[in-house]
Image: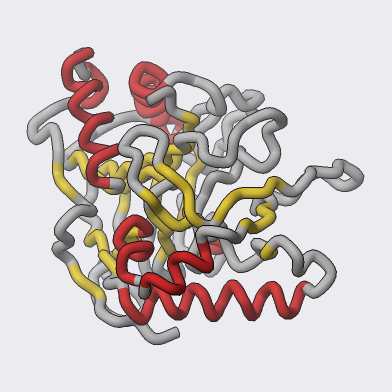
Amino acid sequence: MNKLLTVQQHSRLGKEVLRDCNLASITDQQVEELKQSLWEHGVIVVRKQKLTASQLKDFAIKTFGDSTIGRRPKPLDPEIAPDLQSPGVSILGNPKGLSGEVAGKIAWQWHHDKDHLPKTEGLDMNALYVVMLYGVSIPEEGTDGQPHTTEFLDMVEAYHNLDPQHRQQLELLSMYHLSPISPQPGVEIPRKLHPIVSTHKVTGRYCLYLGSDTSILKGLENQPEVAKQYWQELFEDILDCTPVYAHIWQPGDIVFWDNSQVMHTGMPYNANKYKRIALRVGVMANS
Ligand SMILES: [Fe+2]
């Protein structure tokens, strides 16, 4: 896919907040500051953190509530340091050592997360789903030889960058979305319908929501190939007119993103050569 441009500084995304703050002992006032910055900027970063997985989870609950965190406890994996393990905290990368086996490879394509929204009954697809990703060990470089990054697209900017006629067309359309996490065999998870153009719950800004390339335009339910082609062409139109923001990782970064406002993609690295450990928590926020 052609990209217009990749930038490492963006006018809105990627703002550093709460400098010199330890998130394990964040104050109520700092919680408010962090949340307001997140809704305003879509992607923010707090640097130089040193947290265990449990501290990250406690911080997430204190800041955003615990609506999706309470997963069933799993027994500790003896091959992974106990500090990196806590129920509700996923470990991405190759925490067991150098090998081609990478947890989270599915994220190396453009998508919105919102993975709990389609499978949670009664929950509005426009809910504020926040992901925080804590970079514990960072690969020295990506497979392109450049610094290791996660890339983001500002879907508020993308909406405004499309030509007015295209915007008007999209305002009338909706897509069906499925959870990217496979259900247990035999468990049916219904698809949820969401307008392509929606209004952000806090800021009131218009933004585009595309899910991932498995999303199906309403009306094309019985034509999966046409639906996939529609999605890809729309996404290419967006990439043609909207720059990509690349967050360059430093160890200790915690990057937060509001899935209502941005799409993202993980970037590949050589897992036989470099270690990556990132802890991920996703939570439905009360604004
Ligand atoms: Fe993701």
**Quadrant hosting residue 25:** top left
Q: Residue at x 64, y 80 (%)?
A: 229
Q: The C terminus is located in which quarter?
A: top left
**Quadrant hosting residue 29:** top left
Q: Residue at x 30, y 46 (%)?
A: 42
The colour scheme used to paint the residues is secondary structure
Q: The N terminus is located in which quarter?
A: bottom left
**Is residue 151 visible in this depiction of the protein?**
no
**Quadrant hosting residue 246:** bottom left
From this view, report whether residue 231 is shown above or below residue 137.
Answer: below
From this view, report whether residue 187 is shown above or below residue 166.
Answer: above
Q: Residue at x 62, y 27 (%)?
A: 71
Across and down, in percent, residue 172 comes to 57, 59
The extreme right residue here reads 186
The extreme left residue here reads 20
Query: In the figure, is residue 72 to the left or right of 244?
Result: right
